[in-house]
Image (spheres, grey):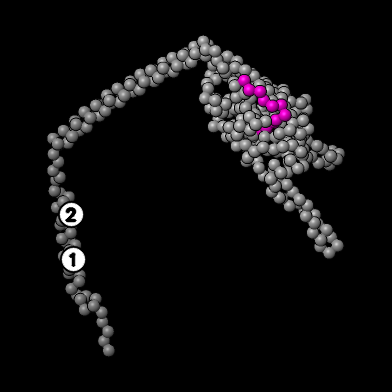
Amino acid sequence: MTIFTLGDRYMGKVPVVLVVLLLASLSLNIYFIHEPVQVDTGVLKERISALEEENRYLKMELYQTNISLQQAREQLATYREQLAELRSMINRTSASPESGSATLDAPAVMQRVEYSGEFPFYTRRIIEEGTMMKVSVDIKPGEGRVLVETTPLMGVVFQDAANNAVAAAENYLGCDLSGSDVIFSVKAEGEVPEVDGPSAGALMAILVIAAVENMTLPDRVTMTGTIRPDGHVGKIGGVVEKAKAAKASGKHIFILPEENSQLVRYEEVKKKYGGLVIITQRPVLVDAKDYIEENIGIRVEYVSSLKDILEFLDTV
């Protein structure tokens, strides 16, 4: 039996074809290499000239635009100065209602460190306790400043909460306090090392509104909650400690953010393994209002905004 392939049959003819194709390719390459490329230099010069002219025009347009922007900035600065001057004149000449004062007690949480044992074998734990602070506001003609005077020292977060409180009060009342100085005074008990945190924000906003509107705030009420410029009252920490401090100071009503409506409490779970009893703590969610009213003995009202607080205060 004879076995052959297609390549075997045409082996004699293939090299000839390849040689012919190779020679043809070399001839074409040599032709194109030696054939000069015709370039119209006149067209290129005209194109370059047109591009240079367009570039000069764009540079001039950019220069004019920069001048216009600078003039607009100067004009805007002038208008701002005139507006500030007009506002100052209005605040100086009008019988501004943005003046007054208000006071309310605010609950707070202080931390202290408790040590046990002897050095160097001792343990340390942080204990949180509730306390009350007297917060006051005085609004007087001024320069739109928000000032905070605290005893003891003040933290940065508290200052930020004061600014948010003033902004929230302005937005709620639709008034402008840029011609007044808002002065907050905070006095805490001597053992409190510093005053900080955002949880007095809602109370400070209510104080500003009460001072402007000449409202009398009920002394038996206290509140806690952060504040945003849009009037939203937000979540805080240390709910139980603050409720205990409010109760101990003689308050009857504790206004609490809706976002704090649930508390995590721990219940004891006992498991027996033969003669061994293992005790663990299991977290349980409970309603804050129910827990505080039943275990601490102070009435709780939930709120979500400044509007909620003011509507409730009208009923007290």
Location of the N terminus by quadrant is: bottom left
Q: Which residues are magenta?
A: 214-224
Judge from the rendering whether residue 41 lies leftward or rightward of residue 309; answer left or right: left
Q: Quadrant of residue 4?
A: bottom left
User: Residue sitting at 84 percent across and 60 percent down?
Assistant: 276
Judge from the rendering whether residue 278 lies leftward or rightward of residue 289; answer left or right: right
Majority SS type along the magenta span: loop
Decide which of 251, 283 is in the foreground and name it. Answer: 251
Badge 2 density bin: few <14, some 14–19, many ≥20, Cα 10 Å: few
Q: Which mark is residue 19?
A: 1
- Residue 151 vs 124, above or below: the answer is above
What secondary structure is marked by label 2?
helix
Amino acid at dot 2: Asn
Judge from the rendering whether residue 81 lies leftward or rightward of residue 7; answer left or right: right
Amino acid at dot 1: Val
- Residue 230 vs 175, above or below: the answer is below
Query: Which circle's residue, 1 or 2, is located before the other in the chain?
Result: 1
Decide which of 118, 154 is in the foreground and name it. Answer: 154
What secondary structure is marked by label 1?
helix
Decide which of 215, 162 is in the foreground and name it. Answer: 215
**Extreme-top residue of the structure:** 93
- Residue 2 in percent (x, y) is at 26, 86
Q: Is residue 228 visible?
A: no
- Residue 37 in percent (x, y) is at 15, 45
- Residue 41 vs 147, above or below: the answer is below
Q: Quadrant of residue 248?
A: top right
Asked whether 38 falls inside the magenta stretch, the response is: no
Location of the C terminus by quadrant is: top right
User: Residue sitting at 68 percent across and 23 percent down?
Assistant: 103
Q: Which mark is residue 29?
A: 2
- Residue 30 in percent (x, y) is at 16, 53
